[in-house]
Image: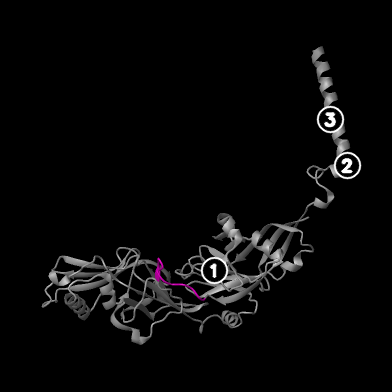
Amino acid sequence: MKSFFKASHLLVYVLTTILAFATIACKDDDSAIGTGIMPNSDMMDFRCDTLGIQTFATRDTHVETQNRTVNPIGIINDPFFGQTTASCAFQVLLSSNNVQLSREIDTTNLSGVKLTLQLKYDNIYGSPESAMKLNVNRLLTDISYDSTYYEDTQFDASQYELLESIDLTTSPDSVIKVEMPQNLVESIIKQNARQETWNNEDFVSFFKGIYVTPEQTSGDGCLYSFNLINSKSKMVLTYNDTCSFDFIIGEYAAKINLYSHDYTNADSELKEAIDNPDQPSKYCYIQGLAGLKTKIKFPELENLFDSKNIIINRAQLKVTIKEGSTNDILPSPTAMSMTKILSTGLFDFLEDYKSNSKNFGGKFEASDNSYTFNIPLHLQSLQSGEPDYGIYMVANDNRIIPYRALLYGGSHEDYSVKIIVYYSKY
C-alpha cells in the first residue's frame, strides 16, 4: 500500500505539470491549433451566404429526334401546359435478303394473305380513360437512318397517304395490331415478283415507311410510348395458313419522333412567360418532348464577394415543385439535368457533372418535392471571370418522355430560389 501511494502522487505531479504548460501555450493566439504554421497572409476566412438567381422560360428547340429508343404517339391536353401532340415515322426492313415471295405465294389468289402491323406498347403518360384513334399512313417521301431530324420536322399532306385507322386500347405489355389493307398486300407481292429478288435497298425504295398520327376522340388525352426496337414491333405477312414473313423495324430502321405544342389554352402566366423570354419568370417551366426548359443566370454573383481571392467550397441549388401542380396522372420528372450554355449558343455538361456525376444531384426528392444540384465548380469559373451565358435545366430523357413540372423560380414573391454558397476567403 505504501509503495502504491508514492507512485500515485508521482502520476498526479506529472499530469499537473503537463496541464500547466498547455494552459500557458493556449494564451498565445498565434499558436492556435492548425494556424500557427500559417503566415498571417494565408489565414482562411470561412463564410456562408445565399445567392439569388434569375429564371427564364425558354422554348426547347433544336432537339434531335431521330432513332430514339422510345417513340411517343398521342395527344394530351394539360390543364397548365396546353396541348402536346406526338407522332412517329419509321421504316420497315426485310428480315432477310434476296427475298422472293412469289415463289411461295400464288399471286393469282391473294385472298388468304394478310399483312399486320405490330407495335409493342411500352408506357403511358396522362389519362388512360381517354379515347384515342391511331391513323396509320404510308410514307411517300424518303427518310434516312443517317440523317438528322429535329422536333419541328413535319410531313405535309402530299407526303403520305392513309392506310388504316384503329381505336387504340391497350394495357401493359400489350402489342397493338393493325390489319393493313388488301391493296397494300397485293402491291408488295406483285412488286417483288417483278423485281425477282429484293434486298433492303430495293424494298425501302418501294415502301418508304410508315407514319403514325394520333386523333383524340374524348377525354383529356394521353401519350402512349412504343418500343420499336423490340422484336415484337414489326410487320408480318401471313400466307398459306401457317407461313409468315417478317418485315422488321429494329435498331437499324430510320425512326423519327415528331412533336408539336399548342399553348393557346395553357395557363396565362405560362403564356406570358413564353411571350417574354428575356423577362425573369417567377416559375421554372419544365416540359419534355421539345416543350419548355428553364434558363438560369447568376447576376448577384459579382456583388456577393468583396474580393477575387475566393474559393467556393460548396454551392447547392435547390428547386421545389409548386404544391398541387403534379399528380399520379401527370407526374414530375424522376430526375433533372443541367447544361452550360456556350458562347456559340450550344451547350455542354457542367464541370461539376463531368468531375463527379454521382455527387452532382438532380434526383427527385419525394420528402419535399425538390431537386438539388451541387454546382461549386461552375460558380467558381464565373467568379474567376468566365462570362455567364446561363445554364439550362431540363428533365432527364426529355427527348422521349413527356414529363412536365412547374417549380418555384427566381422571381417568385414568396418562394424565390436561392443558392446556399459556402466559400473561403484568403
Location of residue 273 with respect to 100 vertically, above or below: below
Q: Which of marks 2 and 1 is nearer the N terminus?
A: 2
Numbered disc in front, either 3 or 2: 2
Judging by the rendered image, the residue that carries numbered circle 3 is 18
Q: Which of marks 3 and 2 is nearer the N terminus?
A: 3
Decide which of 270, 392 is in the foreground and name it: 392
Residue 409 visible: no
Residue 344 located within the stretch drawn in magenta: no
Mark identifier at residue 394: 1
**Label 2 neighbourhood size at 10 Å, few (<14), some (14-19), many (20+)?**
few
Mark identifier at residue 355: none
Q: Which of marks 3 and 1 is nearer the N terminus?
A: 3
Q: Position of residue 81 (x, y in %)?
A: 51, 77
Which segment is the magenta one?
61-71
User: Which of the 4 image quadrants contains residue 153?
Assistant: bottom left
Q: Distance between the residues labelled 3 and 2?
A: 17 Å
Q: Which residue occupies the extreme bottom position in the image?
A: 158
**Label 3 neighbourhood size at 10 Å, few (<14), some (14-19), many (20+)?**
few
Helix or strand or loop: what does disc 2 sit on?
loop
Decide which of 281, 155 is in the foreground and name it: 155
Residue drawn 56% across the image and 57% down it: 357
Residue 269 visible: yes
Q: What secondary structure predominates along the stretch shown in magenta? A: loop
**Label 1 neighbourhood size at 10 Å, few (<14), some (14-19), many (20+)?**
many
Relative to 182, is 357 on the left or the right?
A: right
Q: Position of residue 119 (x, y in %)?
A: 31, 69
The amino acid on which the numbered mark 3 sits, given as a three-letter code, is: Ile
User: Which of the 4 image quadrants contains residue 222?
Assistant: bottom left
